Amino acid sequence: MPKIGMEPIRREQLIKATMAAINEVGLADATVMRIARHAGVSAGIISHYFGGKDGLLEATMRQILSDLGEAVAARRRELTTANPRDHIGAIIDGNFDCSQVTGPVAKTWLAFWASSMHEPQLARLQQVNDRRLYANLCHQFRSLMPRDKARACARALAALIDGLWLRGALTHESLDSDEARLLARDYLDRLLDTHHTTSS
């Protein structure tokens, strides 16, 4: 995490430079020197405020996760109904927000996922992100069905969201967020229709 006293504009500049460097050459070759050149600052600034590349990657992912949380929250605030299906739809849409699917962000996500298997601090961030998605989905499903079924549906939909995102991010073309949303919403309808049929 950056030290207290860093100017927000400088922090944003370095985070954007980190994503640009990862997008350009991948995480392994996104050296502190390369990131510093992208940001137009000295490498010493990065070391001073972030302790090196790992700290900067953590700060970058915290920003991306914050953007994700806000993308979901903004869509839920726009809803005029408390209907759980609508809120789950908003969660789906937020996960495929433009702030999460552009080339630099997508490649940073992929680098983060890979690094989280080896870096405890990044692993904790990934666990927080996983739990947040699952908990938000489970809370909404719980309004529609028994607890065990709600948990199973939340796990299944969370896995589909991650899977659609991952497949899209790994294609040569950019992720088709509209198609991903439609597929996830179609699966949501199937989950809810199946529950309605079996409980009738």
Image (cartoon, rainbow, N blue to C red):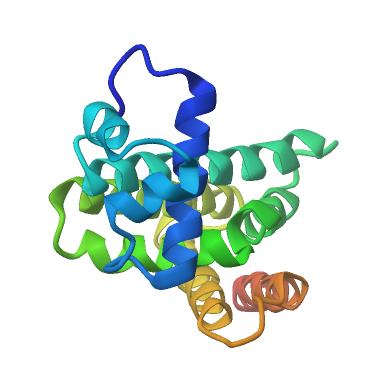
Vertical placement of residue 83 versus 167, above or below: above
Vertical placement of residue 115 versus 183, above or below: above
Q: Nearer the viewer, residue 78 or 190?
A: 78
Number of on-image labels: 0
State the quadrant of the N terminus: top left
Q: Nearer the viewer, residue 178 or 39?
A: 39
In the image as oriented, which residue stretches furthest toward the bottom?
Answer: 172
Point out residue 31 in the picture as x, y percentages from the top left corner: 28, 57
Residue 144 falls in which quadrant of the image?
bottom right
Point out residue 197 in the picture as x, y percentages from the top left corner: 67, 78
Q: Nearer the viewer, residue 169 or 86?
A: 169
Instruction: Note whether residue 163 is visible.
Output: yes
Instruction: Note whether residue 64 is visible.
Output: no
State the residue at coordinates (31%, 51%).
Answer: 33
State the residue at coordinates (14%, 50%).
Answer: 120
Point out residue 148 in the picture as x, y percentages from the top left corner: 39, 61
Vertical placement of residue 158 versus 172, above or below: above
In the image as oriented, which residue stretches furthest toward the right?
Answer: 80
Compared across the picture, whether 172 is left or right of 125 comes to right
In the image as oriented, which residue stretches furthest toward the top?
Answer: 5
State the quadrant of the C terminus: bottom right
State the residue at coordinates (15%, 55%).
Answer: 119
Point out residue 149 in the picture as x, y percentages from the top left corner: 46, 65
Q: Nearer the viewer, residue 101 or 70?
A: 101
